[in-house]
Amino acid sequence: MESKPVINEFSGIAAKGLRNRYIGSLSAADAGERVSVCGWVARVREHGEHLVFVDVRDYSGIVQVVAHSSVDLRSEYVVQVAGLVSERPEGTVNPDLATGEIELTDTEITVLSAAEPPPFAIQDRVEVDEAMRLKFRYLDLRRDKMQHHLRMRARINSAIRASMERQGFTEIETPLLWTPTPEGAREFVVPSRLHQGSTYVLPQSPQIAKQLLMVAGFDRYYQIARCLRDEDLRADRQFEFTQLDLEASFVTQRDIMDFISDAVIAASRAAGISATGEVGEISWKDAMDRFGTDKPDMRFGNELIDVSAVFSNTSVRALSAPCLKALVAPNPSSLTRSKLDDLVDRAKGLGAKGLLWLRAVAGSEGLQFESPVSKFFTADESKSLMDVTKVSEGDVVLIVGDAWEKACHVLGQIRLELGRSQGDPDEFRFVWVVDFPLFEGVDEQGRLISAHHPFTMPNEEDFSKLESDPLSVRSQSYDLVLNGWELGSGSIRIHRADIQSKVFASLGITEEEAGNRFGFLLDAFKYGAPPHGGFAFGIDRLAALLVGEDNIREVIAFPKTQSGADVMTGAPKEIDTRIWDLLGLSVKAPKKYLA
Ligand code: ASP
């Protein structure tokens, strides 16, 4: 019998219609009362000659119903049960069940709907293949775990809305049939019937619309918005996802970060998590230096250490690199020789030229490093490496030498892979990552690549470097990270035409192209654009993390499979050729027919 209570949203809600109580609300305090409940048959057990025990379940709980064996009941039949709440005889109380002290006796059972045997048992502990779960999603969702997750998600949404409204934000819906959004992903297009040959584009985010709302004077806008991106799917990505999207005028980066911090803390509390502490803050440069990533999991230490200075005069070729990063490995005793060889391969797989490892062992003159390369170290190098890494006996130091960003990235990945299990799953460490570079690099044609989107305001102190040294320009953008996952990002936007033209020029976007792509936004800016900025974070991901799931499908009612299919509805499906005609389109033969 399942025992986990779902969420007790039913308390205080009057059951109506065919029942007068929710099952989970029944207790020994109701003994002697006649009640009527409705739900699904979870289990039928013979009890003595003429009696059966029927477990009946609604979303709020499960109750034992004593019935005459003549009733024909099977799993998942939908029933209405009228009966007397009776305390269970001594010795038969079930402490694992919220209603375990009582049962319904003297019952009248009406079958409201018969059911075929379900393809899998509606029980959390029964493992069901993913494809099967998605094909019969309405049965999968009937299980306690999924009821819990989706109801928790609703609570999270509600807490986010309340936080936004408390902070003076107005919820405004923006169009789904829209025009391209500059977020950098592939977009879904919707052919127009009335304007044949033209398409709408589904929004990757309400980015442009929300900026227009600022020009329109809405001051503080928010929306729990559905966004669509035609990208390959993985555990943390679906074609459509939901984000809290906000934008505000006359504010600083700090203000936006505070608005969002309030919302995520409120969401965490709604999910029963109070141990979030303050939302931390780290610069992008520091995050890379210390954790090797712009989404640091700060629940555990083992930070990367810069050891470039230790080996500035080294004769070891592998150590003659622009940057040397070291990591004192967590769980060193598990790092056998073959595990260390695997790590070297892993580092190479991540793009490093190699990885050096050194084990601190007790020698005749105290602690010393044991490693294939340590014999090439000078005494000074060994000593200062010990000092900066603060190793003790048994520790393993891993070193990667490369360009700064590569060395950080490779060792940051290894830190995560070795250390992730050290992070307390019950700890929720939100952290702001700030001071990102404005551009993340240069493409093959020599054009700068925007790190966020082209409307991101450069850091005012760096304005002068936009032309002379663009790669060193920091932006006024900020990411929110939770336990190593990027929840979302945002920025202060450019509201001045002169700065915008400079940034477009750096990105290789000509005036003509900018006009074609976002002319309406640039036009709007001519009519009095307030300084503004915003943010968006993924609610699917936040909800998944808060309920302890890795995969966002666990908090989405009807998700797609990894290949983008909906196995229940069969979408995407071929459509009638008449529809293509109506749209003025013709389709090449689907690939499968060409094979
Ligand atoms: N539109 C951005 C995104 O969807 C967020 C923002 O800058 O507000 O990632």
Image: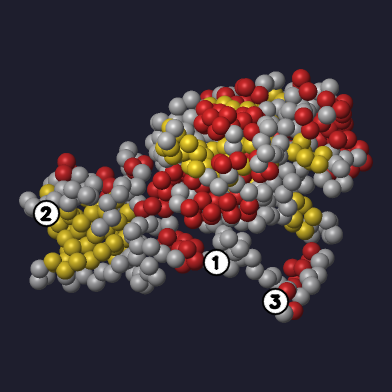
- Return the x and y of residue 370 as percentages of the image width and height: 50, 43
Q: Is residue 255 above or below residue 294?
A: above
Residue 263, visible in the rendered structure: no
Q: Secondary structure at mark 3?
A: helix
Query: Is residue 63 found left or right of 507 in the rendered image?
Result: left
Disc 3 crowd, CA 10 A, few/some/many (<14, 14-19, 20+): few
**Which of the pair 329/383 is nearer the observer?**
383
- Return the x and y of residue 438 as percentages of the image width and height: 75, 32
Disc 1 crowd, CA 10 A, few/some/many (<14, 14-19, 20+): some
**Which of the pair 274/351 is nearer the observer?**
351
Q: Quadrant of the N terminus?
A: bottom left
- Cα separation between marks 1 and 3: 18 Å
Query: Is residue 514 found left or right of 29 in the rendered image?
Result: right
Occupied quadrant, residue 51:
bottom left
Q: Residue at x 38, y 63 (%)?
A: 127
Q: Find disc 2 in the rendering and name its residue.
A: 92
**Which of the pair 297/353 is nearer the observer?**
353
Q: Find disc 3 in the rendering and name its residue.
A: 592
Residue at the front extreme, as displayed: 364
Q: Find disc 1 in the rendering and name its residue.
A: 567
